Image (cartoon, rainbow, N blue to C red):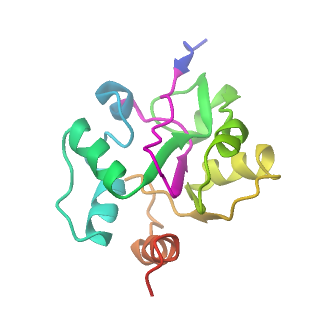
Amino acid sequence: MSDIKRGFAPFVPSGAQVLILGSFPSVKSRSSEFYYGNPQNRFWRVLSEFFNEDTPISTGDKREFLTRHKIALWDMVSECEIEGSSDSSIKNYKVADVANLLQNHKFGLIILNGGKARELFERYCHEADVPAVGLPSTSPANARFSKDEWFRALSRAFGRA
C-alpha cells in the first residue's frame, strides 16, 4: 500500500481572472514544492511564450508571473495514493474543494490541464457557473500536446484576437 501524498494549497493572486486546474502534482513538483516543477513540463514555457516573457525559473519568479497575469493554480486532487507521477495510477483520492474556491473568487475561465483534470472537473464540478475548457496536458509524457490549443484558450481568457 502506498503512502498518501498531499497536493498544494491553491495559489490565487488578488484579482485572478483565470483558474488553471491540473490533476495532482508530479514527483518533481512535490519536490520543488510548487506547481509544474518538472523542467520538462511545457507549462511555464507555453505561458511565457504566450505573454512574450522569459520563462520563470524560481518559485518566487513563478508566483510573480502568475500574479502579474492574474492566473490562479490548483489541482483537482488534494490527496491520493499515486505511483510516481502517473495520473492513471491515482487512487483513493480526495477531490479538492473547487466549488468553494469558485464561490469565493470570480474567474472568467477555467482551463483544465489534461484529461484527468477534465474528467474529475466534469464529475465533481459539473454545476460550476464558469466556462471551462479542457486542454491537452502540458506533461512531458503527453505526445498529443498542442501549443496552438493552449494559445487559443489563453487568447480567449485574456481577450486577445
State the predominant SS element of the stretch in magenta.
loop
115 falls in the magenta region: no
Quadrant where the C terminus lies? bottom left
Q: Which residues are magenta?
A: 6-27
Q: Is residue 41 at least partly visible in the picture?
A: no
Position of residue 53 in the picture relative to residue 25 (left or right) = left
Point 36% across, 55% down: residue: 43
Residue 126's spot in the image, x, y percent? 80, 52
For the residue pair 159 and 42, the one nearer the viewer reads as 159
Residue 44's spot in the image, x, y percent? 31, 55
Quadrant where the N terminus lies? top right
Position of residue 91 in the picture relative to residue 18 (left or right) = right
For the residue pair 76 and 39, the one nearer the viewer reads as 76
Q: Examine the rendered structure and indicate whether residue 160 appears above or below residue 25.
A: below
Point 35% across, 49% down: residue: 67
Residue 24's spot in the image, x, y percent? 53, 36
Point 46% across, 35% down: residue: 25
Q: Is residue 68 at least partly visible in the picture?
A: yes
Point 51% across, 70% down: residue: 157
Residue 56's spot in the image, x, y percent? 21, 50
Residue, far right: 127
Q: Residue 3 appears in which quarter of the rendering?
A: top right
